[in-house]
Amino acid sequence: MYTIEDRLADMATIGDTATAGIAKAARDRRERLGLSLRALAVRSGVSSSMISDIERGAKSPTISTLAALAEALEIPLAVLVDIALPAGGTIHVERSSERAFATDPASGATRHRIGPVLAGSKVEIIRYSVPPRSVAGPFPGHASGTLEHLYLAEGRVGVTLGTETATLEAGDSCICLADRPHGFDNSAGDRAALIYLVIEPPSP
């Protein structure tokens, strides 16, 4: 299986072209979300000077730095490193030990991207856990036309999208046009709210 690590190893020979591609992808996504360098630094835990160097193509980031930026930018890691489909085979496995995740330092909410990400696939599956008595967000809106399909597996949570709100019980689901600020409210809950999200980008 062709992994992120394989791609980064290849970058050593690809050189400036790969670095420039990462720089453009990171900068374009940050600007689309309306984030400053400082805001992205806070969200990702990567220093604003390092982010600036990456966006200018002055430095080639490590896999851990790329993973942190991808989570903060709410995009698959493959979007930044342009992972190609391996030749042959139709089943692509991601082990739990390989899965990238991020924790919001303010709320303690955790975000896991589920499933391998490959070039050409724009759909993401996210496992999101909001601790009891906490609020996660608001998060910046996605690109215009992006849909979020949400299923609440455990707990009870308030979903906020712009000025609209809805309360979900375990087993409920909803679909949202997620191009506005959004968040999850579990401030009244005494257990974690476990959410599964499918993020569907707009059609080209």
Image (tube, rainbow, N blue to C red):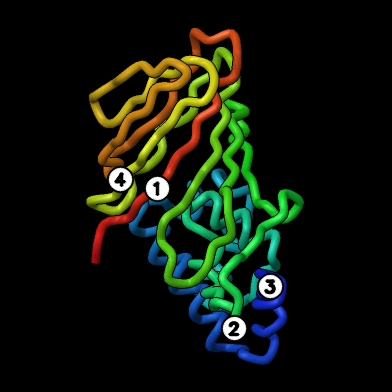
**Which numbered circle lies on residue 199?**
1
Looking at the image, residue 105 lies above or below residue 16: above
> Which residue position is annotated with label 2?
87
- Between 129 and 114, which is closer to the camera in this rendering? 114
Q: Mark 1 or mark 4: name the one nearer the start of the chain.
A: 4
The type of residue carrying mark 3 is Met
Mark 1 touches mark 4? (CB < 8 Å): yes
Residue annotated with mark 4: 147
At label 2, the amino acid type is Ala
Position of residue 177 measured from the top left corner of the image (x, y, whole percent): 25, 40
Q: Compare marks 2 and 3 and give the one earlier in the sequence.
A: 3
**Label 2, residues with CA under 10 Å away: few <14, some 14-19, many ≥20:** few
Disc 1/disc 3 C-alpha distance (Å)? 25 Å
Looking at the rendered structure, the secondary structure element under dot 1 is strand
* Residue 151, horizontal then vertical, whole percent: 43, 31
Look at the numbered disc 3 and give the secondary structure of its residue.
loop
Marks 2/4: CA distance? 31 Å
